[in-house]
Image (spheres, rainbow, N blue to C red):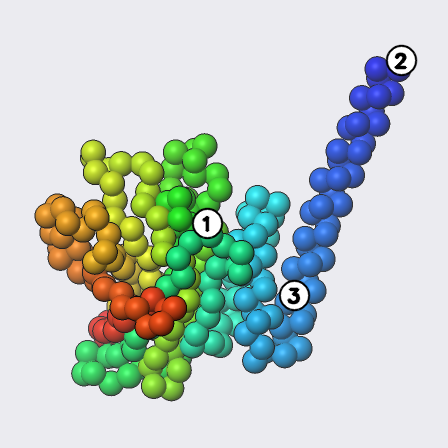
Amino acid sequence: MKKSVCFLVIYTLTLFSIYGYAQTFQHRIAQLEKAFLSNPTDHHQYEKLSFLVSEHYLQLTIAERKEIRAFLSAHSLFSNIHIPPPNEAGQLITVSGTVKDAKGSPLKNIKLFIFHTDTKGYYAPTDAASKRMNEPDPRLWGYVITDKEGKYSFKTIHPGTYPIKYEGRFIPQHIHIQIVEKGYEPYNIQMAFEDDPAMKDTYWRDWAIKQKFPVISFIRAGNLIIGNYNIILSKE
């Protein structure tokens, strides 16, 4: 009898804990969305929502993570963003550039979706156990929209190498950039890095050339590590 009562108490407390935790995040998401909508020019409020995913990925449900991404995508207003939360491990880098059409004219209000792995080479905390790279549901990501001169910029950490080999080779470190814009062909690239040891391999050099993926170099400017990448969008 005592064991049954004890089990019931533990089970009840567990359910309460799980339900309470879920309710807390649902309430937090609603609070952050409301705070941003009351002042939609405040990029700090905007980033707080994305940080909620990066800092509490496993506590949020898949549906909640999708809701946050959909909200931030719909309200993307900023030409420069900070992707990782302040406590994220890794070397900070800044990537900036200009989005233009095939004639060289800058394109404003073009939305870029950016995502990449953490320093361990994982998109999500579940990757290590699943042995799969969860690109559709990354932990580190963000939306940036070009300004009136077609310029964009984002600050993030230098992503790590996948710990899982592909056909006996480690895949180059990279950042995904995706653009889906009406009137233009979809743009989907993996930005590789000149300082990545993998890019010394002819196999990956040829891969980047064939896929038309950029391989960028970084320069140091004081405490900053800066890379530049300009994007050309083609008409449909």
Q: Could you say where residue 150 lies in the image, as x and y percent from the top left?
A: 33, 81
* Mark 1: few/some/many CA within 10 Å (<14, 14-19, 20+): some
Task: Examine the rendered structure and indicate whether residue 38 appears above or below residue 125.
Answer: below
Residue assigned mark 2: 1
Q: In the drawing, does residue 89 fall left or right of residue 32?
A: left
Q: Quick one: quadrant of the C terminus?
A: bottom left
Residue assigned mark 1: 137
Separation of residues labelled 2 and 3 (CA atoms): 46 Å
Separation of residues labelled 2 and 1 (CA atoms): 45 Å
Q: Earlier in the sequence, mark 2 or mark 1?
A: 2
Dot 2: what SS?
loop
Q: Quick one: quadrant of the N terminus?
A: top right
Q: In the drawing, does residue 60 fall left or right of residue 230?
A: right
Residue assigned mark 3: 32
Q: Amino acid at mark 2?
A: Met
Q: In the drawing, does residue 93 fall left or right of residue 230?
A: right
